[in-house]
Amino acid sequence: MEQYLELISVPAIAAIVYGILDILKSAIKNETFNKLIPIIAATLGAVCGVIAFFAIPAIIPAENVWLAIVIGAASGLTATGTNQIFKQLSKDKNEMGNSDKKE
């Protein structure tokens, strides 16, 4: 059962970072902030990785804190990729809907 707990850490960290970034994007409407989102996501993920490493060591597959930072940062960047997937899918639907209306 413990080996399955290790699989939870990446999507859990990605979901946490995605939620925090979504709240921050709503609160901060700034172009400079938008450019820094991947760096912020990696940093938040790294912090979450360290917290998970010390608070719940069974949930993150890391033998040391540096590996927990790397896993957390990669998980945080996953949140940025997930955001872009949703953004691109909704963009395609909007463009298709607008092209139908123009004709």
Image: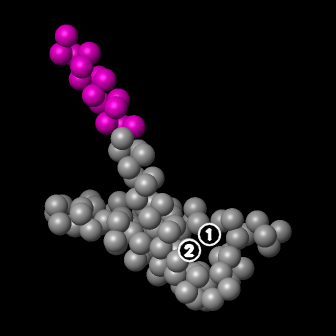
Specify the segment rendered in magenta: 89-103
Residue at the location (72% across, 79% down)? Answer: 58
Q: Quadrant of the N terminus?
A: bottom right
User: Where is residue 82 shown, x and y percent of the image?
Assistant: 45, 53
Dot 2 or dot 1: first in sequence order is: 1
SS state under label 1: helix
Indicate which label's residue lies in the foreground, 2 or 1: 2
Viewer can see residue 55: no
Say which amino acid is labelled 2.
Ile
Q: Is residue 17 magenta?
A: no
The residue identified by callout 2 is 71
SS state under label 2: helix
Residue at the location (35% across, 29% down)? Answer: 93
Q: Is residue 91 left or right of residue 80?
A: left
Work out whether 83 lies above or below 17.
Answer: above
Residue extending farthest top: 103
Q: Nearer the viewer, residue 4 or 22?
A: 4
What's the mark number on residue 9? 1
Q: Quadrant of residue 39?
A: bottom left
Q: Is residue 69 left or right of residue 30?
A: right
Q: How is the image coloured?
A: one colour
Q: Quadrant of residue 65?
A: bottom right
Q: Which SS type dominates the magenta stretch?
A: helix
Q: Is residue 81 left or right of residue 63?
A: left
Q: Quadrant of residue 35?
A: bottom left
Q: State if disc 1 and disc 2 touch (CB < 8 Å).
A: yes
Q: Quadrant of the C terminus?
A: top left
Residue at the location (22% across, 67% down)? Answer: 33
Q: Is residue 16 left or right of residue 21?
A: right
